[in-house]
Image: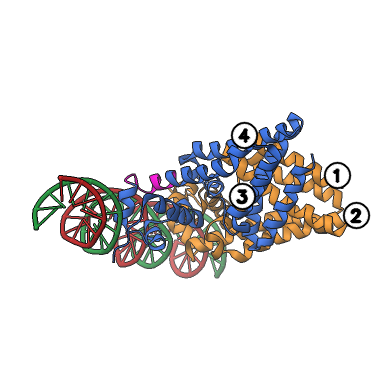
Chain colours: A blue, B orange, C red, D green
DNA sequence: GCTTTTCTAGACCGATCGGTCTACACGATT
DNA sequence: AATCGTGTAGACCGATCGGTCTAGAAAAGC
């Protein structure tokens, strides 16, 4: 049989495998099995192999967050942008059923391979949120701290939700973070 | 050359490799290289192979937390136990230079192999902290939420600190969580 | 001192790893 | 219809995987 994909499809499919298995855990055989893409197709789209796949997946995820979250925070009306952030986060992570691929890569030694994009993603998120909070009238010191707490809090909620295998944990933590951020 | 180890040494050494590389990333060759234990020694101590190593490492970590953190929270004077918790956490994670092996295992599919101990660790931590907060006079609802936020917040701070490759992130987040927990 | 037990070193095994390569399916171009 | 370019399928490769096994070093028991 023969099924034809475009590269953008391939990136999204491969992303889910890395998200579920991690970089080392995602072998070429699990990638081909889960994406239904043959090795031929994968190495056609990503001649640089697994490392290129992961790099493009990271860029793809970063682009999604940039469009849906970072840019609004940086340029749109702050309260609306923050509301949009919470909505987008809840939708993206599917109430904690999905995890943050970039956060997961940060934990083990694959971080060293992709240190720059990982750092850039979190730095931009924190800075964008800080900017929005300042535009909304928060004192500069508070804004920085609140932003850092929110970004780190989301990662923590994802870890705890998965560890407990309980979606409601994520929803509850997210709800409280939203309130904490709003009460400025 | 011949160096003799005891099993407890082996567990502690192997733990660091899993912590740094993750379950899939820790190959037998990296384990032998970093621990200086030969395959013969490793399979002598852990006839069940990698899976047994990881299981015993998880139990070892859990035991440390039980002794240093959970039991004090469950039985000692609550304010002192909470203070001890923050001290122990900061010391254990070395200001974010070390990560939480159990949290890391929770993120990818290795969670499914070790679902029970992972869940048990986080459930006990959250429950123990909730108990201490209630004993300290916090309303039951608040206590549960504060406990959940603290446990998840620590995990988030570890992710963010490693992602940013910046120890000060962990210290700052930890400091604010400590205050938030104390202001009841 | 001799035996037994415990532990180590590392050669070795089949399976699986990431990656390459050939053959070809198929739409677009001419 | 012939050609070309893009993408697919999967056999194949050397390297590395997790795991087994033998030989022997040192400690413990007698």
> What residue sits right under mark 2 in the picture?
B137
Residue interval drawn in magenta: A47-55
B15 displayed left or right of B157: left
Please give the chain letter of the residue carrying mark 3: A
Say if the magenta span includes residue A54: yes
Say if the magenta span includes residue B94: no
> What residue sits right under mark 3 in the picture?
A88
Contact (Cβ within 8 Å) of mark 3 with mark 2: no
For the residue labelled by badge 4, is the local secondary structure a helix, a strand or a loop? helix
For the residue labelled by badge 2, is the local secondary structure a helix, a strand or a loop? loop
Q: Main secondary structure of the magenta part?
A: helix
Front-most of D19 and B21? B21
> What residue sits right under mark 1 in the picture?
B183
User: Up-down: is B61 above or below B115?
Assistant: above
| Marker disc for residue A75 | 4
Front-most of B119 and B49? B119
């Amino acid at each position: 049989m023969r099924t034809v994909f475009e590269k953008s499809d391939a990136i999204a499919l491969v992303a889910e495998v890395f998200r579920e298995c991690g970089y080392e855990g995602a072998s070429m055989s699990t990638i081909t099995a889960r994406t239904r893409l043959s090795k031929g197709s994968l190495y056609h789209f990503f001649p640089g192999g697994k490392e290129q796949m992961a790099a493009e997946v990271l860029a793809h995820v970063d682009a999604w967050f940039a469009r849906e979250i970072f840019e609004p925070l940086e340029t749109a009306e702050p309260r609306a942008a923050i509301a949009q952030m919470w909505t987008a986060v809840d939708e993206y992570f599917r109430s904690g059923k999905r995890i943050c691929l970039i956060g997961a890569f940060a934990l083990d030694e694959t971080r060293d391979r992709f240190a720059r994009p990982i750092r850039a993603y979190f730095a931009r998120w924190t800075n964008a949120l800080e900017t929005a909070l300042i535009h909304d009238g928060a004192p500069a010191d508070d804004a920085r701290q609140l932003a850092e707490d929110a970004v780190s809090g989301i990662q923590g909620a994802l870890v705890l939700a998965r560890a407990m295998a309980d979606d409601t944990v994520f929803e509850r933590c997210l709800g409280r973070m939203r309130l904490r951020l709003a009460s400025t």
